[in-house]
Structure formats: structure tokens, C-alpha cells
Amino acid sequence: MRTLRVLARSLLPSMRSEVAAGARGSERAPRQLRARVPRRRLRVRAPRRLCLRLPAAEGLGLGPGLRPQPRAGVGDWTEVLTETVKVLQSGRVVGVPTDTIYGIACLAQNSEAIRRIYEIKGRNEDKPLAICVGSVEDIYRYCKVTVSDQVLRDLLPGPVTLVFKRSDELNEDLNPFTELVGVRIPKHPFIQKLAQMCGEPLALTSANVSSQTSTLTTEEFRDLWPLLGLVVDGGPVGNMMSPECRLGSTVVNLAVPGKYSIIRPGCAFAATVGILQNEHGLSLQC
């Protein structure tokens, strides 16, 4: 069994009023407030948290492998999924585990939430955000697909971002400077189910300040917690001793029919190229 925790830093207005009251009484009030929560149990200074026990994730297949593997069920995750959906639908940004690194996400169709992601990361506005969907079928709704359905299913779910021309269904405020969009289906059952329950794509990017190292645990992006509506702690992602695990997904441009180009090698470069070239006959775009 492993634990998935929802760590709520700024969900409750009562916390803000408590902090303000403490500040009026003493300059050291924030330290006193933090000290009241046992660190070994919570790992976030908040008046409330939700902690669920989840099924063992044997066969989850997280990491750079591309082939489909059995995934743990999400039947016991109802409470944490429901809470996360509520926070997303309120326009806030959440921290979530994926199959590669930790990410922060918001609803891609919410323009204000997209602006908030850029503010949180300190990200240049000319750098695009990828979208995350819950199934291969959803890709056709938001992208102009140029490859066979089997190509999509051989690569996804997995640690790969596929870039296509965007459809008119996608929020025009998401990456307005380009006609392209990257789409992901991480091989992680939690975020897959989350996207399905939201009924619309998530805008997804790495959980770190722009240009800083990607993160494999929630502790590694602790500095972002106060800016997030919720943090879902799924434990360490990948092998923390392996530099490859911090590379993020492999990003491949498939916008030109019959061609591919690698935008970012990422953690699944060799496997992705092998599938595109050897199994489906796509050629490298020069």
C-alpha cells in the first residue's frame, strides 16, 4: 500500500484569517503557526489535510517505458479525485504526480487559470503549455491528427508529448502565438482519471520555477505550495538517483503527415523513435 496525500496549503479562508491574527500579535506568529502541525505527519502547514490509503501500484509501469502495462485501479481514490476536480473548476492550479515528473495543472479552457500558471512558474509567455487528456479519443477533439490511431495507441499512455496543429475546440488563449499544441496522456492512473472527470483538457507543465530542476517529489517544489490550491502527493516519481528521470517527456512534432521531428529528447527518446520509424515508417523531418 502506498499513500496519496492531498496537501491543501491555501484552500481555507480560515487559515488566512488565522495567519493575519497571529501576525498582529507577534512577528514570529507564522513560525508558531507552523510549529503546531506535526511535520512527520503532514509535510504542509495547513489547518486541514486529506490523507487516503491507495491500492498497491504493482505493474503501474511508471518511468520511461512505452508499452502498455497493467495499472492500479482508482476505485478508492474518489475523495481525492473529487476534491481535486473542485479546486480545478474553481480556477486554481494544482500540483499532481505524472509518469515522469511532478507537474502543475489547471483547466486548459480557463484563460485566467492559464495566466496563473505562468505567474507561478515565472515562465515566459512565449513558451507553450501542453495539454493532458484522459483518453486517445480526446486527442481528436483538440488536435488535427496526422497519424494513424495505432501510432497514438503505441505511444500513449506514456512519457511522450505529441505535437499537432490545434483544433478550434481549444481555448484560443492557450498558446495564442502558435497553431501547434502538445498533448499528453501520462501513464499514471490518477491524472488520467482526473482529466476524464474534468471533461476537458488540463494545461500541464512541470512543477518548478522556470529554468530550475524538475521535481520528483512534492518536497522538491515546496516553494510553490503557497501558490497552489492543492498538492496531490503520490510519493516519489521514478528513480531519484537517475538523471534520466528528470528529463521529462519526449516531445515529438507530428504536425507534418508522414514525418516526425524531435523537439525535446526527454526520457523516452530511443523507444519513441523506434516506434515511429521501425514500426510505422515515419521519416525524420530535416
Image (cartoon, grey):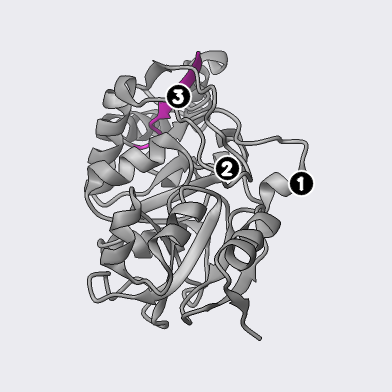
Splitting the image into 4 quarters, where does residue 142 fall?
A: bottom left
- Kindly identify which numbered label has been placed on residue 284: none
Q: Could you say where residue 93 lies in the image, as x and y percent from the top left?
A: 36, 49
Q: Where is residue 82 in the image (x, y as percent from the top left)?
A: 24, 32
Residue under label 3, please give it.
4
> Can residue 107 be seen in the rendering of this structure?
no
Report how far apart the C-alphas of labels 1 and 3 lie in the structure: 24 Å
Q: Is residue 120 above or below residue 80?
A: below
> In percent of the image, x 50 and y 53: which residue is there?
154
The C terminus is located in which quarter? bottom right
Q: Do the residues labelled 1 and 2 touch (CB within 8 Å)?
A: no
Mark 1 or mark 3: which comes first in sequence? Answer: 3
Residue under circle 1?
Answer: 243
The residue at which mark 2 appears reads as 221
The local crowd at label 1, few if under 14, some if 14 to 19, many if 20 or more residues have their Cα within 10 Å, is: few
Residue 9 part of the magenta-drawn span: yes
Q: What element carries label 2?
A: helix
In the image, residue 277 sits, relative to residue 228, either above or below, namely: below
Residue beneath the point at 32% across and 28% down = 80
Q: Is residue 80 magenta?
A: no
Q: Of the residues shown, which amino acid type is indicated by label 1?
A: Pro
Residue stretch rendered in magenta on the structure:
1-10
Q: Position of residue 269 (x, y in %)?
A: 67, 59
Q: Which residue is at the front of the view, 10 or 281?
A: 281
User: Residue 95 falls in which quadrant of the image?
Assistant: top left
The amino acid pointed to by label 3 is: Leu
Alpha carbon separation for disc pair 2 and 3: 17 Å
